[in-house]
Amino acid sequence: MKQIFGKSQSGNLKEAVRGISRPQFLMLFSNGDQFEAHVKELEELYPEVPSIGCIGMSYDSKVVEKGVGVIAFSDGIIAAANVLEEASSMPVKY
């Protein structure tokens, strides 16, 4: 498994994903003001790549509080998105 972390303090998604190629799964950490735009742009940049996103902070050596962070996984990862199983009986588990 390979993991790449990218970030942009200013909220520039293209800056955050620079160097990410052929990901198999993406995690997005955005700010509340840009979340919907970041989700749309990420899906346009990486169509058909499963992803999950949230409003929150990300960090490596510095905290990205109002920008955007992306973690890309590749090399042997198998992921699926838009799948919610057993929601009526045990939603927290699934």
Image: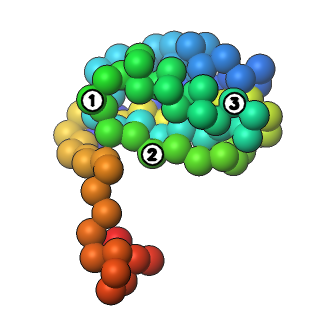
Whether residue 93 appears in this view of the structure is no
Q: From this viewpoint, which residue is outermost toward the front?
A: 88
- Residue 47 picture quarter: top left
Q: Looking at the picture, does residue 14 appear above or below residue 77? A: above
Which residue is found at the position 51% from the left and 13% from the top? Answer: 18
Q: Which mark is residue 34?
A: 3
Q: Is residue 57 above or below residue 85?
A: above
Please tell me whether mark 2 sits on a helix, a strand or a loop.
strand
Rendering quarter of residue 59? top right
Q: CA distance from mark 1 to mark 2?
A: 12 Å
Q: Amino acid at mark 3?
A: Gln
Which label belongs to residue 52?
A: 2
Name which residue lies at 21% across and 45% down.
Answer: 78
Colour scheme = rainbow
Question: Is any atom of residue 47 visible in this view?
Answer: yes
Q: x%, y% of residue 17?
A: 51, 20
Query: Which kind of residue does numbered mark 2 sit on?
Result: Ile
Label tally: 3
Tell me the element at label 1.
Answer: loop
Vertical comparison of 91 with 38: above or below:
below
Gap in angstroms between the C-alphas marked 3 and 2: 15 Å
Q: Secondary structure at mark 3?
A: loop
Residue at image mark 1: 48
Q: Is residue 1 left or right of residue 30?
A: left
Residue 53 placed where, x, y %?
Answer: 52, 44
Q: Position of residue 4 (x, y in %)?
A: 46, 30
Mark found first going from the N terminus, 3 or 2: 3
Q: Which mark is residue 3?
A: none
The residue lying toward the viewer, choosing from 66 and 61, is 66
Q: Earlier in the sequence, mark 3 or mark 1?
A: 3
